[in-house]
Amino acid sequence: MKLAIAAFVALLSASAAAPAFAQESPVSVSIVSGSEASQPCVSAKTCYDPDTITISPRTEVFWTNNDTTAHTVTSGDPSGNDVGSVFDSGQIGPQGTYSFIFMSQGTFDYFCTIHPWMTGQVIVGAPSVPGSTTPEFGPAAALVFVASVFFTVFLARGRF
């Protein structure tokens, strides 16, 4: 009986501490030097480098301004009605940084409000958890399973 209780407590503790999915490693994007002076970065797609990234939810993206003038990282499209509705860095000075954690799936266009030819895109796909055995409905399933096994053992013995 003591062994069954100890096993139950150990399994309960382990499953309660398991995250639904792990936070991904941060991703860096560079605001390229010279992006403000002319627009060749538009055709080369190098104003933000890389200009398109694909990440998992809960990933933090860092933008670093490697230019000599201020820039922004603002969600939306210059001609859209949703400018800055998801994120807006405000002005990022030279060598400054801005970060944002993308929690939900979707495609997020962004641009510089000062230099609207500078555009980029973040694509947030399904979470990637290599080797994870946690069901898609999270660690609560493990708790329910452990509790049901525990109570089944005691009911079968007639001690509960």
Image: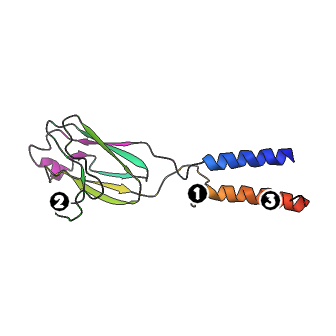
Where's residue 14, x and y in %? 66, 46
- Looking at the image, which residue is at 16% across and 63% down? 79
Residue range in magenta is 22-49
Q: Earlier in the sequence, mark 1 or mark 2?
A: 2
Spatial CA span between label 1 and label 2: 39 Å
Mark 1 or mark 3: whose residue is earlier in sequence? 1
On screen, residue 155 above or below 1: below
- Residue for badge 1: 138
Q: Residue reaching furthest left?
A: 37
3 or 2: mark nearer the eye: 3
Q: Which residue is mark 2?
A: 78
Residue sitting at 69 percent across and 59 percent down? 144
Residue 32 pos. (x, y %): 20, 41
Furthest toward the right, the residue is 158
Direction front: furthest residue: 160
Q: Is residue 94 above or below residue 117?
A: above
**Looking at the picture, which amino acid does disc 3 mark?**
Phe
Q: Magenta span has 29?
A: yes
> What is the C-alpha distance between the residues marked 3 and 2?
59 Å
Disc 3 or 2, which lies upstream in sequence?
Answer: 2
Is 4 on the left or on the right of 27, as rendered? right
**Residue 38: numbered disc:** none
Circle 1: residue type: Gly
Pointer 3 residue: 151
Q: Which amino acid, mark 2?
A: Pro
